[in-house]
Image (tube, rainbow, N blue to C red):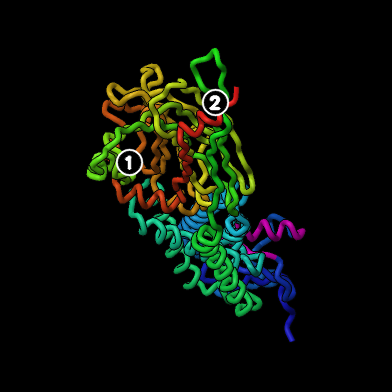
């Protein structure tokens, strides 16, 4: 039996890396002769050791001149591309997950955000695994970690592209999604070709874990986007009531208290996008012939609900008092209530037959959207110094405008920005819409209602449904003569 050499240099593997063993035990690996000397030096061998001395070094698969170097440039290119792709995917997961994990309203949406952050953390762990797997492979699971990170990138980018295809709006970020999707396909092909699963101790358990994680993510996402907004009802209690009038013998006026009340009795908090209360005085002429029924079309053309009375003709409604309730940008949480009391002043000899108090507001569900703080700041349409809200010939309105974000960040990153706009004036009441139209830094030179002609009506309806934008109102009508009889000195 011959004496075994002290040092054995094994044949180069497919990457050009040669394993170094001493007495059957692996002591290192080397890409080149210089690296071999470095390994031996660390073990106490002299720097001038003759590596061609067969009594001390045994070469297998080629002597000291055979160093394939594995085409080192190609290996470094693969490492670089893998790192760039994983860093990009990590950043994408962090951007999507951070906002949802910290700011989402529902538990399911927060859970989705946490899952995205965990996926980003796994990809962060996969970064050093890339260097190890295409390096000396000192960690057995490095290839599996890279495979897991790539599969997460492929799943996320596929989902993002699917969501983008639902709207097909051109946004710059779709180029990032597409680039990362193509990268993940290339990376997966590279890992499959290298059969990295051979380094996984329990490949079936690994596959089962990936499958379960994907299913949990899909279920959480579906619950967050589809089920939760539908399951949580929206319900309010509104009241507008006239109180007992007050008068004085020396005063030609009568003072009528008005109580306004709103309570969110539903399960979801809402934003008050715009609100309004108004008191209308109605006057009419007596029509003995009953021809008043023929005048209902006029009211309908003016925007009123169709109604008519046979013995009332030339019905006219005038605004006596108008104002805002809570104000745009405020919130009404589940179970929260808001009250307001006003005093309406009328002359004792008023010609109005009835008074009608209307309380109305537009709400946006907080489980579907989040309005930026900018929306709370009012702009006055008639003041040119306020720039983007200046209007030459559109009447006098208080305007609120700001970005609204969907409560699931997956939707935000796959669509154009959406904006919510609200208009209010004492003469024309209120209006609101959500769309991709942003009149920032633009000069409005037409009426507020003509702006709607520039908007896509289908888009406004779709966005109103998506964000839960809805009108809520109540009205209370009383006889003026009845109020006068109740008047107390």
**Residue 129 locus on image (x, y percent):** 61, 60
Give the residue at the far top of this rendering.
250
Tell which circle, 2 or 1, labels the residue nearer the N-terminal end: 1
Q: Quadrant of the N terminus?
A: bottom right
Identify the residue shown where x is 63% and y is 77%. 205
Identify the residue shown where x is 66% and y is 65%. 138
Give the residue at the far right of this rendering.
44
Secondary element type, mark 1 = loop
Q: Dot 1: within a 10 Å radius of its alpha carbon, few (fewer than 14), some, or many (20 or more) residues?
A: few
Secondary element type, mark 2 = strand
Give the residue at the far bottom of this rendering.
1
- Answer whether residue 37 is magenta in the image: yes
Identify the residue shown where x is 30% and y is 27%. 444
Whether residues under marks 2 and 1 lie with C-beta atoms below 8 angstroms apart, the answer is no
**Residue 333 locus on image (x, y percent):** 61, 45
The correct choice, above or below, for 189 with respect to 183 in the image is below
Q: Nearer the viewer, residue 249 or 343?
A: 249
The correct choice, above or below, for 228 with respect to 311 in the image is below
Q: Which residues are magenta?
A: 28-44
Q: Dot 2: within a 10 Å radius of its alpha carbon, few (fewer than 14), some, or many (20 or more) residues?
A: some
Q: CA distance from mark 2 to mark 1?
A: 25 Å
**Residue 392 locus on image (x, y percent):** 28, 21
Q: Nearer the viewer, residue 122 or 137?
A: 122
> Number of marks in the image?
2
The residue to which callout 2 is attached is 343
Instruction: Answer whether residue 182 is visible to the viewer in this image.
Output: no
- Answer whether residue 323 is magenta in the image: no
The residue to which callout 1 is attached is 304
Q: Nearer the viewer, residue 277 or 324?
A: 277
């Amino acid at each position: 039996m011959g004496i075994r050499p002290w040092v054995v240099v094994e044949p180069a593997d497919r990457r050009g890396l040669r394993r170094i063993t001493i007495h059957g035990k692996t002591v290192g690996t080397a890409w080149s002769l210089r690296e071999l000397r470095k390994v031996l030096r660390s073990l106490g061998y002299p720097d001038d050791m003759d590596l061609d001395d067969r009594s001390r070094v045994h070469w297998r698969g080629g002597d000291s001149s055979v160093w394939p170097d594995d085409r080192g440039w190609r290996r470094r290119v693969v490492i670089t591309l893998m790192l760039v792709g994983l860093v990009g995917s990590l950043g994408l997961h962090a951007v999507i997950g951070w906002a949802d994990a910290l700011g989402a309203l529902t538990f399911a949406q927060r859970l989705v955000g946490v899952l995205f952050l965990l996926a980003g953390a796994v990809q962060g762990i996969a970064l050093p695994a890339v260097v190890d797997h295409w390096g000396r492979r000192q960690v057995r699971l490095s290839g599996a970690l890279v495979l897991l990170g790539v599969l997460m990138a492929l799943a996320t980018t596929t989902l993002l592209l699917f969501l983008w295809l639902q709207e097909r709006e051109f946004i710059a970020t779709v180029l990032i999604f597409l680039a990362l999707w193509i990268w993940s396909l290339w990376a997966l092909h590279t890992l499959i070709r290298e059969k990295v699963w051979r380094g996984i101790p329990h490949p079936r358990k690994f596959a089962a874990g990936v499958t379960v994680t994907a299913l949990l993510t899909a279920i959480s996402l579906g619950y967050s986007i589809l089920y939760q907004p539908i399951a949580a009802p929206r319900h309010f209690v509104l009241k507008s009531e006239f109180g007992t009038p007050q008068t004085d013998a020396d005063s030609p006026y009568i003072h009528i208290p008005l109580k306004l009340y709103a309570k969110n009795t539903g399960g979801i908090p809402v934003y008050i996008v715009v609100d309004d209360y108004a008191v209308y005085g109605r006057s009419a002429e007596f029509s003995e012939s009953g021809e008043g029924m023929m005048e209902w079309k006029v009211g309908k053309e003016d925007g009123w609900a169709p109604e008519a009375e046979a013995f009332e003709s030339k019905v006219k409604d005038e605004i006596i008092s108008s104002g805002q309730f809570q104000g745009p940008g405020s919130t009404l949480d589940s179970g929260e209530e808001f009250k307001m009391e006003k005093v309406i002043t009328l002359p004792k000899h008023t010609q109005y037959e009835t008074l009608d108090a209307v309380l109305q507001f537009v709400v946006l569900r907080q489980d579907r959207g989040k309005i930026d703080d900018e929306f709370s700041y009012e702009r006055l349409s008639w003041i040119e110094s306020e720039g983007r809200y200046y209007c030459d010939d559109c009447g006098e309105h208080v305007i609120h405008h700001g970005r609204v974000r969907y409560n699931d960040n997956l939707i935000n990153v796959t669509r154009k920005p959406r904006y919510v706009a609200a208009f209010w004036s004492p003469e024309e009441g209120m209006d609101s819409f959500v769309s991709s139209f942003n009149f920032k830094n633009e000069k409005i030179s037409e009426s507020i209602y003509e702006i709607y002609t520039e908007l896509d009506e289908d888009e406004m309806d779709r966005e109103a449904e998506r964000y839960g934008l809805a009108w809520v109102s109540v009205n209370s009508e009383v006889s003026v003569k009845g109020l006068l009889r109740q008047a107390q000195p």
